Amino acid sequence: MTPEEFSARYMAHFSAQQKAAVQAVNGAVLLLAVPGSGKTTVLVTRLGYLALCCGVDPGSILVMTYTVAATQELRARFAALFPQLSGRTPQFRTINGLSAKIIESCSRLRGPAFTLQENEGELAALVGRICLELHGEYPTDATVREIRTAITYCKNMMLGADEIRAQHFDVPGFFTIYTRYCQALRAARQMDYDDQMTYALAILRKHPDVLAQFQTQYPHLCVDESQDTSRVQHAIIRLLAEKTGDLFLVGDEDQSIYGFRAAWPEALLQFPQTYPGAKLLFMEENYRSTPQILQAANAFIAKNRSRYPKTIRPVRPAGQPVQPVHAASRQAQIRYLLALAAQVQEPPFTVLYRNNDSALPLIDALERASLPYRCRGAEDTFFTHRIVCDVCDILRFAAAPDNTERFLRIYYKFGAMISREAALAACAESARTHAPVLACLLAQGGLPDTCREAAEQLRARLDALPQTSGEALIRTIWGPMGYSRFVTERRLDPGKFSILCMLAAPHPSAAAFLARLDTLRQLIRTHRDAPDARLTLSTIHGSKGLEYDRVFLLDVHDGVLPADPNGADGTEDAQRAYEEDRRLFYVAMTRAKNELYLFDYPDVPSAFVRELRQQLPRLFRPAEDFASILPENACGLRYRHAAHGEGQILAQCGDAMLVAFADGDRCLQAGQMLLERDRTPDARTAPPSAQPLPLEAAACVPGSEIWHRKYGRGRIVSLQGTLAAIRFEAPGETAPRTFCLPAALQNGFLSFKTDAPG
């Protein structure tokens, strides 16, 4: 097949940049593809071009990607696009899968060395035993996962002993844990999946015959999602490409969001130096999102320092502006989403967040309201985090003050200066007499005055906990009882505290809260996606490569996203982490096809939302004249409805309000609020700016011609007080639009025909 025939058949609708990427078949090539640019289609098409136009044997092409699911997708898409090549397909493998082949090949020649330990449970148990030996207590599941992630990072980044010691992992004694873990695996002649790659690299470096075998077998290399590839993986790729130099990398450093798993975007930035003479190609057309969404994404990511200069170019026509959702609090955002979910939503909407903790209060609310939802990759690790386990232990000890086992887990976490000897003696006495442990402690002779005073205060607060309700349960433990000091000393994640507060808020007692935590954990474990769900929940990481019509970004605020708002001015590591947080936000924004909503809370700062507002103030303005009807942020203001009585505005998005009434939360439109307000003379109504203004223009009557600065010529269909229904002549404007007429005239949204331009 000639290139011209191939182009006509397979690339008729490709852009010039896409065609150039397909036809770049010689030497080292780095293709930088922005979100929604069709990179997977281009990669698969290029494989067919190599086979059909360049005479390359498909079996000599090795396509590497990050996950098994990605390899399966690429294989399926190649088979569907090029059925004539059935039986002659490229090799699609993860880099781990390739590493296994390298080790297998070496073992056939030189005998087996290490076996792969595939059971993650066994590896987790090994970490647990090491921590028990070092710290005297078995770690929680969440801590074990943190340790395993840190081990993966160290191995994938090929860190030496001094470099590992210099890392700031939130795990006490990590270097010792890491060392003993590696020693235990070597003693058992075992390797984990990370070792699999480091061993494969060592084999390629040490055994030229094995390296030559794979270089000859796969002279053509393609790597997808290369921004997520680690240092050790790039080292393997470089060795394999050394002979022919035929390497095609597809990626986007702006979408590198797996730094905690050792993703190394620096390899892309250093590509021209690593592969002299390499081609650098771009795909900048975005077929997914509206220009408004992409304008915001471009403006934001452009502030990152470690990136190639590129700009997403929209292909689609204009859509809605990026819309902030003003919420009175983090709890209010949950109530707003709950109200949306209770309505019939078309199209469905998606809620994205940094980590699963953010979703827990929403999942709790959805389950309580029996509202169907889908959830991608929910985990129950929150419930095994050290802070959560400690809070549960404290609450349960308060209800059963003679439980010696729990007392020994918590007594030293309050700063009460209780010695180990005194604690053990009190537990022994409690076990003998069944008296409360703290009573036994206070009965001891020789107890220092400071310790006695602290223990008495602790006992008083513990005695009060079972009858405490709502957030006060958590705040008492955190503040007056002194647990926050333990969190700070151990460098634990304080974000768990705010989530616990939100989950505790509805509960009248500690017992009710604990019961709900148990229920919620079981619900998450057993959740099945509802076929009639109108919303989807997902982490941003879990949404990578996907797209959604309507996206709400949850918990975009300092401390969560970004984790450290001052990171840009910190150490090199802090700057690197801050830029990855920016990339994570960028990936989240570019998942949205048509509508993008950002939650904004007046009492919780957000460096990212603030930056966007400063850069693109007009982008966040409502498309209609709503700004002239109500303040931009009306959260917290009172409103009296004719039927529902007095309420408070909890959240605001465009011309929609979430108002909390005594009989429940309701979403109301601004015009609806004006029409349905309580009109009794002594009633409090909507905010002053929402009050009807005197009708100054006598010419405004049904049938009057009027102009809108966006929609052009229109005619007043009806008037109800100061609200005018206007039908416009612009294409697609079939239904009338409602305006607060005097405010729209005063602010220049509307004008009389005689005042209209032209």
Image: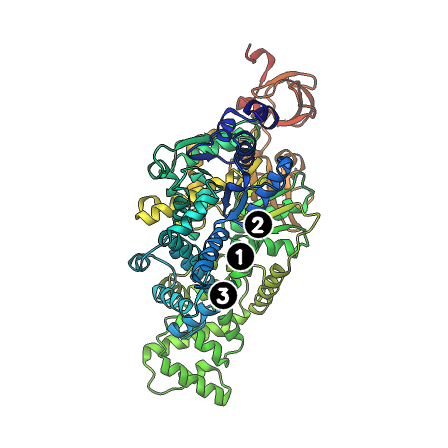
Left or right? Give the position of 731 relative to 499: right
Tag 2: Cα neighbours inside 10 Å, few (<14), some, or many (≥20)?
Answer: many
User: Which mark sits nearer the N-terminus, 3 or 1?
Assistant: 3
Whether residue 256 is visible, yes or no, is no
- Quarter of the image where one finds residue 106: bottom left
The residue depicted at 63 percent of the width and 50 percent of the height is 374
Pointers 2 and 3 in contact (CB under 8 A)? no
* Distance in Å between CA atoms under marks 2 and 3: 28 Å
- Mark on residue 141? 3
Label 1 is placed on what type of residue? Met
Which residue of the protein is positioned furthest toward the bottom in this rendering? 432
**Percent coordinates x, y for residue 47 in the rendering:** 54, 36
**Percent coordinates x, y for residue 147 in the rendering:** 42, 62
Pointers 2 and 1 in contact (CB under 8 A)? yes
Residue wearing tag 2:
334
**Percent coordinates x, y for residue 23 in the rendering:** 49, 28
Left or right? Give the position of 27 relative to 121: left
Residue wearing tag 1:
502
Helix, strand or loop status at disc 2: helix
Quarter that holds the C terminus = top right
The residue depicted at 51 percent of the width and 62 percent of the height is 118
* Distance in Å between CA atoms under marks 2 and 1: 10 Å
Whether residue 99 is visible, yes or no, is yes
Q: What's the colour scheme?
A: rainbow
Label 3 is placed on what type of residue? Asp
